[in-house]
Amino acid sequence: MIIAVASGKGGTGKTTVAVNIALSLDNVQFLDCDVEEPNAHIFLKPRIEKTILSSIPVPEIDTKKCVYCGKCAEVCVYNAIAIVPPTNNNAGVALTLTNLCHGCQACSFFCPKGAIRERKKEIGVVEFGSKKDIEFIHGRLNIGEAMAPPVIRQVKGHINPRKTVIIDAPPGVSCPVIAAVKDSDFCLLVTEPTPFGLSDLSLAVELLHKLRVPFGVIINRADLGDKETERYCEKEKIEILMKIPFNKEIALAYSRGEAVVNVLPEYKTKFKDLFQKIAHR
Ligand code: SF4
Ligand code: SF4
């Protein structure tokens, strides 16, 4: 079973929940797909055993073969190619904007003259490790690089179907979240009971409806803030699967980079029960 843990906004406790579920179950594979800011390793402390480079194929136009037909720019939905045909006075321009390129290879496929070569552009790394019986994989996007989804897809390419897979998704509702959450069996949306939390939760709910991924909500620091999140979930018929009250020991454990289940072992049972609820839906 693949369970993604996501949140409409950062700082809700998403990684804390993901890590502690992983530590509460047996036979787990943990994928940190928050590749712009991977930090689950701080709590899990895995031993990294292997690192591979993550790259995408980006186009290089051979101007000797190019006839400036513009087909490549036409098929590139990311506007990563600009073609200006030559005039009597000016030479043509064939420009590739590799920072916008998603490496989909459509341009080279459709070029009628075979004028596009591809070169590998390194955008990050994927690291493999383990912590006791937890298999751990995370991606790291290079600083200044915009293309998180290819790194996320590379991490997810190593999903082990024989394990319970916990995916720590990036926060927000943009392309990286879609890449991380897509094809999961269930998504846990972690939120906090504040107007900001609710606003971003409603966006995340919309996204999950579009992706057709079943989901439920965890309210973190549930005794702080207001009751609007609970009212919203009731109105939208969204199941609140767990409420985690504010707890000084949890906050202190977080500040030390320590897992909740290590300081409050009763949470192991709570996360196990949560998993059972999801698995038997
Ligand atoms: S499709 Fe090929 S020939 Fe046409 S502009 Fe692009 S690179 Fe040049
Ligand atoms: S590989 Fe895809 S995204 Fe990149 S320039 Fe070509 S068509 Fe555009």
Image: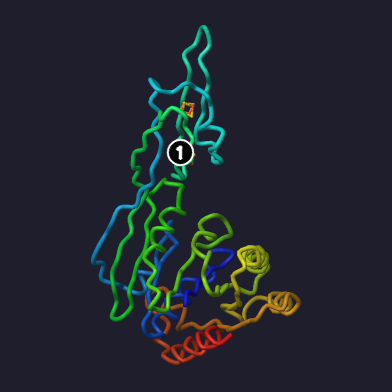
Residue 88: horizontal and vertical position, in percent?
52, 7
Q: Residue furthest front?
A: 112
- Secondary structure type for disc 1: helix
Q: Quick one: label 1, few (<14), some, or many (20+) residues within 10 Å?
A: few
Residue 8 rendering spot, x and y as whole percentages: 59, 64
Identity of the residue furthest to the right in this view: 235
- As displayed, is residue 25 above or below residue 131? below
Question: What residue appears at the point 59 percent right and 83 percent down from the top-left corner?
Answer: 241
Count of numbered tags = 1
Q: Nearer the viewer, residue 35 or 210?
A: 210
Question: Quarter-wise, where is residue 57 in the image?
Answer: top left
Residue ID for mark 1: 109
Q: Residue at x 60, y 75 (%)?
A: 215
x then y, percent, for residue 234 = 73, 80
Left or right of 260 on screen, residue 89: right
Instruction: State the residue in front, 220 or 147.
Output: 147
Q: Nearer the viewer, residue 281 or 196?
A: 281
Q: Is residue 195 left or right of residue 186?
A: right
Residue drawn at (76%, 77%), measured in percent from left and top? 235
- Amino acid type of the residue tagged 1 in the rendering: Phe
For the C terminus, the quadrant is: bottom right
